[in-house]
């Protein structure tokens, strides 16, 4: 919304300039009231904008953009106010004074800017996240079968693009399902094109077999912390018994997060998302034996 706010600031500045030019030419008190109303409202709006943008700044470039937009508007308004006061002193109409029109003008500008700063971001975010809701639930229905999936929480994921900068890279959806008591998390990219990670299966089987596990969103690092060691060891034991020659090469975490091949850097094997382990249109919960078979198949 920074771009839209900046555009509105420019429009307000143009109206201010037109108002003081007309004031000089016509000595019209109405022009002065419009000018003062917009100027005072702009100072208030700049303070609000800086507070909103600074609190939501992501990385250094975002913080610089926030400072530029609010600083630009504030400095220009200071200059225009000084010019406006000088022009007012030079006009011949001594009856120029503030009236209620300046108040109403200021209120209107504050309302418009407040909508841009507060209402529009909330509306845009809700629309975006609802789109993600549908995508994630559809993905789960196709992959594991219908189980009344409900979105409990949505968290943001940020990634670094440099030492000081970062950007929104995806969302973590916390999901409740009729399949089990605890919630689980599905990670999706910021454009809702693909699933990054899907922690349904390790949570499901950890509950089914009473394995200890942990899965939570870390606010500080904006990432997911998990520990499925008992589940991983259980799958590895099955692999060790059936495919002892392959067990060391298989990363069980490929079932639920971005699959990492231990020899990918040597063979040039690309990293693939976990839905290659379990088909995206599987339509049911795979058994542990089916998971093992898919892992072996993937690692051939």
Image (cartoon, grey):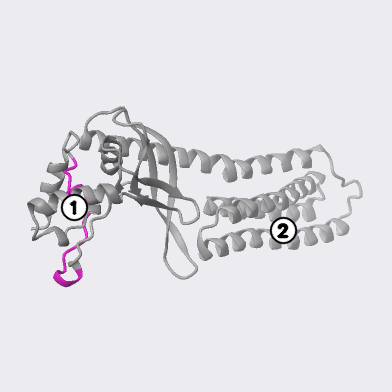
Residue hosting label 1: 236
User: 210 or 226: nearer the eye?
Assistant: 210
Look at the image and tell me whether residue 53 can be seen: yes
Look at the image and tell me whether residue 195 can be seen: no
Residue hosting label 2: 77
Numbered range of the magenta stretch = 265-280
The percent coordinates of residue 190 (x first, y second) are 37, 50
The percent coordinates of residue 248 (x first, y second) are 16, 62
The percent coordinates of residue 108 (x first, y second) are 68, 39
Placement of 248 over or under 242, stated as above or below:
below
The percent coordinates of residue 78 (x first, y second) are 75, 61
The answer for how far apart the CA atoms under marks 2 and 1 are is 67 Å
In primary-sequence order, the first of circles 2 and 1 is: 2
| Quadrant hosting residue 111 | top right
Q: How many marks?
A: 2
Q: What residue sits 30% from the left and 37% below the top?
A: 207
Q: Is residue 255 left or right of residue 58?
A: left
Q: What residue sits 12% from the left and 57% below the top?
A: 299
Q: Is residue 176 left or right of residue 295?
A: right
- Count neighbours of disc 1 (C-alpha within 10 A) and say few if under 14, some if 14 to 19, many if 20 or more: many
Question: Residue 270 lies in magenta, yes or no?
Answer: yes
Q: Is residue 174 left or right of residue 268?
A: right
- Count neighbours of disc 2 (C-alpha within 10 A) and say few if under 14, some if 14 to 19, many if 20 or more: many
User: 213 or 11: nearer the eye?
Assistant: 213
Question: Residue 164 lies in magenta, yes or no?
Answer: no
User: 40 or 212: nearer the eye?
Assistant: 212
Q: Specify the quadrant that holds the C terminus.
A: bottom left
């Amino acid at each position: 919304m920074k771009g839209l706010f900046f555009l509105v600031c420019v429009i307000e500045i143009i109206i201010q300039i037109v108002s003081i030019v007309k004031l000089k030419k016509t000595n019209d008190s109405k022009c002065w009231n419009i000018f003062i109303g917009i100027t005072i409202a702009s100072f208030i709006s700049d303070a609000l904008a800086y507070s909103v943008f600074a609190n939501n700044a992501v990385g250094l470039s975002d913080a610089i953009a926030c400072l530029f937009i609010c600083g630009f508007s504030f400095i220009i308004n200071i200059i225009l106010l000084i010019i406006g006061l000088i022009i007012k002193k030079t006009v011949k109409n001594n009856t120029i004074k503030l009236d209620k029109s300046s108040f109403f003008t200021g209120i209107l500008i504050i309302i418009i800017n407040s909508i841009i700063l507060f209402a529009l971001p909330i509306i845009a975010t809700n629309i975006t996240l609802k789109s993600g809701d549908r995508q994630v639930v559809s993905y789960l229905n196709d992959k594991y079968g219908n189980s009344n999936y409900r979105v409990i929480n949505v968290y943001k994921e940020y990634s670094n693009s440099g030492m000081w900068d970062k950007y929104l890279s995806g969302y973590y959806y916390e999901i409740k399902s009729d399949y089990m008591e605890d919630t689980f998390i599905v990670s999706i990219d910021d454009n809702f094109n693909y699933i990054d990670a899907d922690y349904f299966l390790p949570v499901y089987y950890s509950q089914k077999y009473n394995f200890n596990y942990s899965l939570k969103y870390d606010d500080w690092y904006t990432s997911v912390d998990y520990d499925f060691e008992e589940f991983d060891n259980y799958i590895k034991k099955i692999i060790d018994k059936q495919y002892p020659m392959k067990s060391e090469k298989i990363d069980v975490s490929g079932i639920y997060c971005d699959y990492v091949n231990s020899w990918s850097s040597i063979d040039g094997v690309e990293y693939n998302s976990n839905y290659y382990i379990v088909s995206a249109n599987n339509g049911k919960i795979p058994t542990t034996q089916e998971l093992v078979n898919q892992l072996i198949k993937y690692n051939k």
